[in-house]
């Protein structure tokens, strides 16, 4: 596991401290919030900035095509969400969001799948399939530049607390919490990476290490695996809750999907 050595170094600084020495409120200070983009090398930034070179646009284009194409017996997404329907511009910046009917927390992937089931009579798309990633990337791209802003009141409050709790909980063989890297050590080097503040505003994103496009949940699974903790399932309620906590924590940052990351 390639993080092991470096995590060892982080642990010297932190792992043996009793839990109580970590302030649960050690959030990144409001004026200090930076997108992961700020920590990238110039060539990676350039790749994200150029819509023709950014490989993420292969997925955006795929999603746009699907959005405008009818599957057997169903109306297209664009029938309802086209220029004369309920345009989806800006909506992705407000996800995850609680579904008023069921009270369940939905991220963008889940909202798209719900629409397929309820309004198109179609089966949900598999999490992490190129079709769902493409559709999510297309809808997210309609919010590029919009500031992240989510509702954590009312029925969303318990999910926010659950996500926050996960973020500060130590776990895995290295007994590390998300907060120890992304609140307390951002800006420091971890192998070839510079640890960022761990915001989700660029996802779904193309990762050079994956040679592939992936969801935020795939990124979270990598972080959990990196500390040798059991990763949560794709689309699990826990990762949805973490996604809500991350979005609130990133409030005001511009939406970047399709981002490019190392
Ligand atoms: C051992 C340190 C470490 C821990 C613990 C850790 N991460 Fe990460 N994380 C990284 C590194 C390194 C990266 C890649 C560079 C970067 O963007 O920070 C990363 C990337 C991310 C990103 C993508 C940021 C971007 O802009 O691309 C998110 C989101 C994230 N982590 C969230 C989490 C969450 C949530 C947890 C807890 C479940 C967690 N991380 C635990 C080290 C860590
Ligand atoms: C028959 C009309 C119809 C079709 C077809 C349809 N939707 Fe929807 N969609 C709706 C309605 C109505 C809502 C508002 C929420 C609700 O009542 O379910 C909605 C809500 C949404 C939302 C959440 C918007 C918000 O403001 O939070 C997204 C995202 C979405 N749809 C994406 C899609 C995608 C992608 C497709 C194609 C896979 C699609 N929809 C197909 C009618 C439709």
Image (spheres, rainbow, N blue to C red):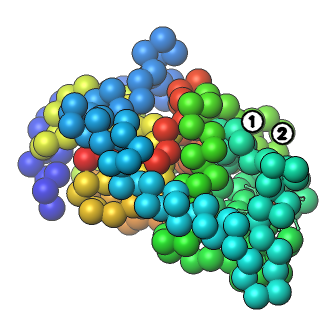
The quadrant in which residue 111 appears is: bottom right
Indicate the quadrant of ligand 2 in the picture: bottom right
Relative depth, front residue between 152 and 65: 65
Residue 235, can we see it? no
Q: Residues within 10 Å of mark 1 (few under 14, many from 20)?
A: some
In the visual, does 98 lie left or right of 214? right
In the visual, does 54 lie left or right of 192? right
Relative depth, front residue between 236 and 145: 145
Residue at 17% from the left image edge and 45% from the top image edge? 7
In the visual, does 12 lie left or right of 167? left
Residue pointed to by mark 2: 154
Q: Secondary structure at mark 2?
A: helix
The residue at the far bottom in this view is 72
Residue at 77% from the left image edge and 70% from the top image edge? 76
Q: Is residue 188 above or below residue 172?
A: above
Residue at 70% from the left image edge and 56% from the top image edge? 106
Q: Position of residue 79 (x, y in %)?
A: 83, 64
In the visual, does 106 lie left or right of 7? right
Mark 1 Cβ and ligand 2 under 8 Å apart? no
Q: Residues within 10 Å of mark 2 (few under 14, many from 20)?
A: few
Relative depth, front residue between 209 and 226: 209
The residue at the far left in this view is 5
CB under 8 Å between discs 2 and 1: yes
Q: Is residue 249 above or below residue 173?
A: above
Q: Secondary structure at mark 1?
A: loop
Residue at 63% from the left image edge and 44% from the top image edge? 142
Residue pointed to by mark 1: 151
Q: Position of residue 57 (x, y in %)?
A: 45, 54
Q: Report how far apart the C-alphas of labels 2 and 1 lie in the structure.
A: 9 Å
Task: Give the quarter of the figure containing the N terminus.
Answer: bottom left
């Amino acid at each position: 596991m390639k993080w092991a050595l470096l995590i060892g170094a982080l642990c010297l600084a932190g792992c043996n401290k009793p839990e109580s020495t970590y302030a649960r409120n050690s959030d990144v200070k409001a004026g200090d919030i930076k997108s992961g983009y700020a920590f990238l090398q110039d060539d990676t930034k350039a790749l994200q900035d150029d819509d023709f070179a950014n490989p993420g646009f292969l997925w955006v284009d795929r999603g746009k095509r699907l959005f405008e194409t009818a599957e057997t017996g169903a109306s297209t997404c664009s029938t309802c969400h086209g220029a004369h329907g309920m345009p989806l511009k800006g909506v992705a910046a407000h996800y995850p969001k609680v579904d008023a009917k069921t009270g369940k927390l939905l991220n963008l992937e889940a909202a798209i799948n719900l629409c397929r089931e309820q309004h198109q009579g179609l089966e949900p798309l598999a999490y992490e399939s190129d079709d769902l990633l493409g559709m999510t990337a297309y809808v997210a791209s309609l919010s590029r530049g919009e500031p992240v802003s989510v509702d954590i009141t009312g029925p969303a409050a318990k999910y926010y607390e659950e996500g926050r709790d996960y973020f500060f909980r130590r776990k895995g063989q290295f007994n590390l919490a998300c907060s120890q890297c992304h609140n307390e050590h951002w800006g420091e080097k971890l192998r070839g990476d510079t640890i960022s503040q761990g915001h989700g505003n660029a996802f779904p994103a193309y990762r050079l290490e994956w040679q592939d496009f992936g969801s935020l949940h795939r990124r979270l699974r990598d972080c959990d695996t990196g500390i040798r903790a059991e990763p949560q399932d794709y689309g699990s309620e826990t990762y949805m809750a973490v996604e809500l906590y991350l979005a609130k924590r990133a409030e005001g940052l511009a939406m970047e999907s399709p981002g490019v990351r190392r």
